[in-house]
Image (cartoon, rainbow, N blue to C red):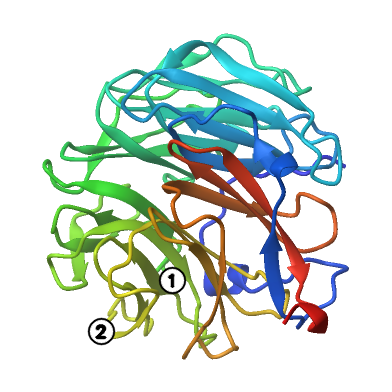
Amino acid sequence: MRQLRTIVMLVTAETLTMALPGALCGDERIFVSTDRLIMGTEANLSASVRIADIDGDNDLDVIIANGRHWPQQNFLMVNQGRARFGVQRPLGQERRTSYATEVADMDGDGDLDIVVGNDMAPNCVFLNNGAGYFGKSRDFGEISSVRSLTLADIDADGDVDVLATCRGRRNQIYLNDGTGQFFAGLPFGQRDDSTIDVAVADLNRDGHADLVLANRDAQQNFVLLNDGHTNFNTRIPFGSGDDQTRAIAVADVNSDGWLDLVTGNIGQTNVVYLGDGQTSFDETFNFGREGGKTYALSAVDMDNDGDVDLVAVNAAQQNAVFFNPGDGSSFREVCFGDASHATYGLDTGDLDGDGFRDIAVANSGSGNQVFLNRPQHKSSR
């Protein structure tokens, strides 16, 4: 059966603690790579990477968005099994200034489509023919300073919508008509927000998709509550008010049944804001480096022990997985990658079929790379 990576389910505390089936739990883990796990031969200005089974052959492929402010070719790396990427396909004929790529079934036909967000160039949707090939894209939305895309069913009508964050400009929600075409954007946040990332989760358990904004440029971060009619007028601040936040994740980090917020920051430590079920996030603790430069985050179970670990990738610092002992009170840091790289994006998925999540990273100015999740044997300690 084809595995679809669709982003249509609201994040809840219960959806974030499931271990992958068929894998042993509890081992200490490390992350290894070789030159054969570099994604292609060119050092592109990559900003985003996503893992998904694009061609329906039951292994996971890799999609990479390139360019940032300069037009470059986006591409797919096709998995030949066991994390062997011997085929590269271009995504589209035009080169654009791509910052983001996301994957979901946008037209309801049962295969995975690709949405690309571009900086001051049209955003686009590539529809899958069912075998992992993509024809001419459909442009959508207004041209803006897009920095990230998030896919979720915001209006609860059963299809996948697109949220586009735009640094220094109005963020937009594009509602899907069910066929992969989009209505005019609905704004969220303030007109001059420097929003770099947004997470979607039902934070107050009312059945509606709320938004969590990561704002850069010393701006206040906010939770925006959904009134059930895709209005986000209730704004709950969190953080210091002048953070440099570039990434956001939502997960039940301390396993208390309530969703917590995790921020990746520039020039300061990363922070976990503990939720109490009342949309208050006053209790916090820090992780990572004092002068951190985290550009992307993921909150997933990397060692299959049933709790949520954190993956943070950085610019000019080593990337790291922070393993959770179970109560979210402290983390064991395991570093990976080259400290000289500028890593803008990451995704996790079982690329080699061993039951553990591996890591793919998007590096700006150096080769993109896969790191395989392996047990740390006693001889290597």
In the picture provided, is 59 more to the left or to the right than 163? Answer: right
Say which element carries label 1.
loop
Q: Say which residue appears at 37% left-offset and 23% top-offset.
A: 97
Of discs 2 and 1, which sits in the foreground? Answer: 2
Q: Is residue 69 left or right of residue 190?
A: right
Q: Which residue is mark 1?
A: 205
Residue 171: x %, y % from top left: 25, 39
Q: Residue at x 60, y 37 (%)?
A: 104
Residue 342 location in percent, x, y?
Answer: 41, 47
Q: Secondary structure at mark 2?
A: loop
Point 77% across, 67% down: residue: 374
Question: Separation of disc 2 and disc 1 at Cα?
Answer: 19 Å
Identify which residue is drawn at 48% across, 88% down.
330
Q: Give the residue pinned by disc 2.
A: 282
Few, some or many residues within 10 Å of mark 1 (<14, 14–19, 20+): some
Q: Residues within 10 Å of mark 2 (few under 14, many from 20)?
A: few
Amino acid type, residue under disc 1 in the picture: Arg
As rendered, which of 89 and 140 lies closer to the eye?
A: 89
Total labels: the figure holds 2
Find residue 55 and report its image quarter: top right
Q: Earlier in the sequence, mark 2 or mark 1?
A: 1
Whether residue 124 is situated above or below residue 231 in the rendered picture? above
Whether residue 110 is visible: no
Given the image, on which type of amino acid does mark 2 rest? Answer: Asp
Residue 75 horizontal/vertical position (percent)? 60, 24
Residue 33 in picture, x, y percent from top left: 70, 53
Quadrant placement of the N terminus: top right
Q: Locate residue 369 relative to residue 267 in the image: left or right.
A: right
Residue 360 in view (yes/no): yes
> Viewed as shown, does residue 237 lie left or right of 119?
left
